Amino acid sequence: MRRQTAILTTLLLAFFVSIGVAAPRGFGWRGSGGWGGDGAYGRMFDPKTVVTVSGTITSLEQVTPIKGMGVGVHLMLKTTTENVDVHLGPLWYLESQDADLKAGDAIDVRGSRIQIDKKPAMIAIEIKRGEDVLVLRDADGVPRWAGWRRGAPRRP
């Protein structure tokens, strides 16, 4: 009987460890999914390359900018001279914002010009549509979704 109890206890312990019950982590928060200002993607932001471009949204899509990141949202912006791939932020954050961007909207985008996979792109600081403004990052590129870590210094 003791041997059966020991075996059952071992099996239950192995089961609970495999599903994470035996070792809970914090409050179950999942982190930024690679969208934090100090990750590889966030470090692409360069305040020296910040520009403002105007144009019309041709599409909004879900994207994963770098392998291993969480899903984000980007838009294609048609200007008078080019099509610009504009990265907004993580899907989970944008879904919580009161922004109704859609194809055909005329907008102004302020952001950092970057390269992703050797292709030109832009990490948006803010989007303006008429009088509406969607602020995504501060002037240094620190994301609004960074929460309480917003005041932390950026890593070089």
Image (cartoon, helix red, strand yellow):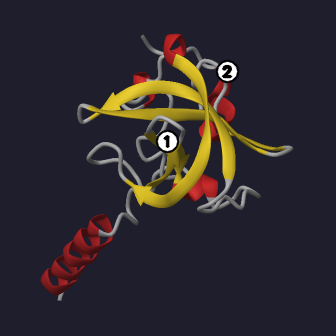
Q: How many marks?
A: 2
Residue 151 is tagged as: 2
Residue 19, by quadrant, is bottom left
83 is higher (above) or lower (below) than 12: above
Callout 2 crowding tier (Cα within 10 Å): few <14, some 14–19, many ≥20: few
To which residue does mark 1 refer?
86
| Residue 63 position in % (x across, y down) | 39, 55
The quarter of the image holding the N terminus is: bottom left
Q: What residue type is labelled 1?
A: Val
33 is higher (above) or lower (below) than 9: above
Q: Is residue 55 left or right of residue 90?
A: right
Q: Which of marks 1 and 2 is in front?
A: 1
Q: Identify the secondary structure beneath mark 2.
A: helix
| Residue 80 position in % (x across, y down) | 54, 38
Q: What residue type is labelled 2?
A: Gly
Q: Identify the secondary structure beneath mark 1.
A: strand
- In the foreground, 97 or 87: 87
